[in-house]
Amino acid sequence: SSGINAEYGHPMPLWVIRHLDIFYGLTALYIVLFGLICNLATLVFFIKAKQDLVKRIYILIATTDLIICILMLPIAVSYLDYRNAHIFSVKILCNLHGFLWNVSSRLSVYLVMIISITRTIYLVLPFNTISQRKIYASVAIYTLIQLAQASLPFSMKIEYYYNQLNTRCIWTINDVTTSRHLVLIGHVFLVIIPLIVPVIPITCSAVMSVYALLKSIRMSSVGKNSKDSSGSSLHMNQQVIADKRQVTVTIIVMTIVYIVFNIPPIITLIMYEVGYIDPRINDLFRFDEFSYYNNFQEIYCVGLNAIVNPIIY
């Protein structure tokens, strides 16, 4: 802890840093244990269920979240043991951890976006069929893009390294360039866009789902007032509305969870990038402090999201 305080000039007293590290470490252990149990149970449940497009996407999400929970374990150990590197001191394990963290955290966000869109289409356009091949192809293409992005440091002959402040293995464009504008462009395309773009379709899915539900309720009320409506058709309409209500609630909860766990790190990261490119803002806050808070938000928002997802599903 003294090394962190001396090297990065962190304003908090050493005893506060140590107590916070213990809290962070225990929280990460909780995410590991609870996340492994929940995601394994979810994975087994959907594998045994009758397969369709939505359930296969759920399987992919549970698998991705399971990987994230496993990757939280060495982070927890580092926090609890005075931020010592442990397995991160092994070069190949450090590279593997950084690589998997970047891919899985981005892929999890994309899969949530896909599940929101597909369920909304089923809800709004029940008689339209979704091309499963196109969905699988989009997931495969996006996965390849993230694999390429996570492999970028290797192509530039640099490696992931253990950052004591962030308690995990990272790499930055700062390692290969001193150009502020190039750093900003790189971070925007590699970090901000993959996280912030899904906000639009996920939010739109929630709005459209509510609209479809209200429309069904209105049509059902009209049917009830019609003298020609039979008891069986009314019962069927009520069942359809109940199903749509359940799907709508799920999509709304998914949207809220996404916003809660993903927007704060995005905002902090954007503030960091703006300050990096503008020297006037550079004087208003310390980059090391922003890096510390942004990293904390990224680690724990991703981890907590990984244990909340199986509860929702």
Image (cartoon, rainbow, N blue to C red):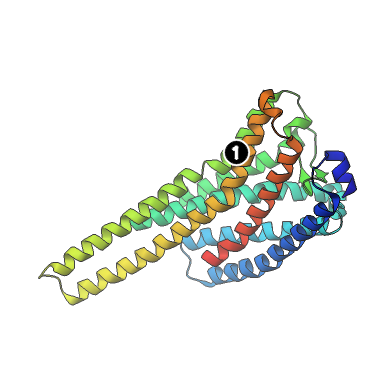
The residue nearer to you, when weighing 207 against 173, is: 207
Q: Quadrant of residue 119?
A: bottom left
Does dot 1 land on a helix, a strand or a loop? helix
Give the residue drawn at x 35%, y 56%: 210
Give the residue drawn at x 57%, y 68%: 42
* Amino acid marked by disc 1: Ile
29 shown above or below 91: below
In the picture of the structure, the residue carrying the numbered disc 1 is 192
The residue nearer to you, when weighing 63 against 284, is: 284
Report the number of discs. 1
Give the residue drawn at x 68%, y 63%: 31
Image coordinates of residue 84 in percent, x first then y, are: 87, 52
Residue 130 in sight here: no
Image coordinates of residue 97 in percent, x first then y, are: 76, 50
Image coordinates of residue 151 in percent, x first then y, are: 71, 40
291 shown above or below 66: above
Q: Is residue 197 left or right of residue 206?
A: right
Give the residue drawn at x 46%, y 43%: 200
- Residue sticking out furthest to the left: 227
121 shown above or below 233: above
Residue 230 in sight here: yes
- Would you call the spot at circle 1 few (<14 residues within 10 Å), some (14-19), or many (20 or more)? some
Image coordinates of residue 288 in percent, x first then y, are: 76, 38
